[in-house]
Image (spheres, rainbow, N blue to C red):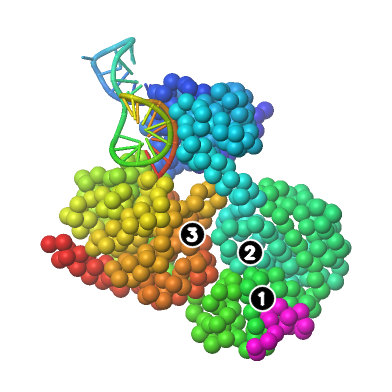
Amino acid sequence: MQKRIALKNKDIIRSFRLAVSLLELHDENPFKIRTYSNAVANLERLEIPLAGLRVIDLEHLEGVGKSIASKIFELNQTGSFPELDTLLAATPPGVVDMLRIKGIGPKKIRTIWKELGVETAEDLLQACENNQIAALKGFGTKTQETIKNALLYSESSKGKVHYATVEKYTEDFVSFLQTGLHTDLVAVAGEVRRRMEIIENLLFIAATDQPGQVSVLLQERPELQQEPVISGPFVWRGRETQTGVPVEIKIVSPQTFYNALFLHTGAPAHLQATYHDTSTLLQLANQQIFASEEEIYRKAGMAYIEPEMREGTQELTLARENRLPLLVTNADLHGILHNHTTYSDGANTLTTMATYCRDQGYEYVDICDHSKAAFYANGLVEHRVKEQHREIEQLNRELAPFKIFKGIEADILADGSLDYNDEVLSSFDFVVASIHSNLKMEEKKATERLLGAIQNPFTTILGHPTGRLLLQREGYPIDYKTIIDACAFYKVIIEINANPWRLDLDWRWVEYALVQGVLLSINPDAHSTAGYHDMHYGVQVARKGGLTKEMTFNAWPLEKVANYFEDRRIKAITEVK
DNA sequence: GCCGTTTTCGGCCCGACTGTTTTCAGTCG
């Protein structure tokens, strides 16, 4: 009997996306490919789980007919469907991997594969080095460079993961060791404790008087593969096999636990900081046993520094002068800005997005669907803006005192203008301006384009300033100081996009923004109710950068936010008259 | 492969941009 697998909608969508790419790669009927793409677009907007549906129910879904319905059903039964299996069997795995390369699509990959016989990333890099790619018809030196850069970027991302990928794992693993070793003295240290956006290794500190016990316990963790050559009696080293991330477990005596935790949390620049003019924190923690991290800082004559700030930048001076900021917390947030609904490319309806947010205890939610230039994301043409506004007004009457603000994520066009006229822009409570197209830009071009949007009186918030996707693509280069200075001058709020793939504005620029008096808003860019939970990651990087409650726009209460939006909107209308 | 009929087969088909061409295919969002 076949095992029934309960797939999530996104897993099903992922399989169909792969099928689309493979069909294109194998030069199948373009209309068939379009149909699959349409089905994917419709499935993305579905609020109900596909897993429980019968074939006959599936056939009634928009864009889904007999064939696709049975494929969805089959996916749920077996995890695949015959056509996908056939396509995969006809494609070398290395060629399937190439589909992930940004800047080239299935057609170009087909040419490379068929003309040059290239079937792996290594061969592809070699072909770039040998100038074979540039020589292909329809290719040139620029395409070859694009491919080479993408391969090198992907190579440099190997064995690294987003913070969000390992957070839950590290928490569970700490509990596991605490239970097994009968102690509370187990903690994650290193990059994870510092809440770095990209994690290159997992480091744990475990206190026990019986070091041998750790190896015994780890036999229950098949996902952890030891590398005996680099391990020892007081350190276990190896890898977490699902992600490939290196893992290190330091085994210490209970007395030295806090010293070890301290020494393995701060970045080198933090530990090398001097206190009382001569000694470093590193020396201090190596010389004397402490019963807590607070005690270490006290001894050094500094205020306690939160782990996420221990990077060796401005936090040491602030701690010495007892001027450390009181960092924003999840509990400080009153509302959630920048969210998508089924009006554009979100998975949940306006009502669902709003009531969910209300039920989580927030005072307000801001809906920012895509604007009309984002055709691919079903961006809102003018009459649909009006339609959405009517629905928001109706819901606001029903849900009061909870408030839905009418926002939009307006595309910043190539010339820095926004893609609606002033009249339409003035109909929103506020505007998030973001770049989504033509991401290949020089720093000068990108900075000027952003400046254009910042100078638009209707722009309230600058969305994900660099467009980066961590571990997947670098953002366009920008002159941070110029952008932040302009936001200060034109009173534009900067978003800290909380999606773990973005975390953009980068936390390294938070302090500079605060010094210039720029407000920051921690926004999830949620495309479903689940997306709201990304706020947590945004708060972490914001804290890392030193953000306070006062300077976090969405930590403001409803009335203050409403007044801010209205004042700004009226000022903009007056300005363009 | 789906849809919508003039019900059983024809039509479906974003816009901007890049990099390659010398008029447009491929890619992206």
State the count of labels: 3
Tag 2: amino acid: Glu
Q: Which mark, by number, is residue A271?
A: 1
The residue shown at (82%, 74%) is A253
Tag 3: amino acid: Leu
Q: Is residue A171 or residue A522 the one in the foreground?
A: A522
The residue shown at (22%, 46%) is A382
Residue A450 covered by magenta stretch: no
**Mark 3 sits on what residue?**
A503
In this rendering, the answer to whether A423 lies above or below A382 is below
What segment carries the magenta color?
Answer: A276-291
**Mark 2 sits on what residue?**
A191
Are the numbered discs 2 and 1 placed on the same chain, yes or no?
Answer: yes
Give the CA distance from mark 3 to mark 2.
16 Å
- What is the chain identity of the residue bearing mark 2? A
Q: Earlier in the sequence, mark 3 or mark 2?
A: 2
Q: Secondary structure at mark 2?
A: helix
- Residue A193 percent location from the top left of the image: 63, 67
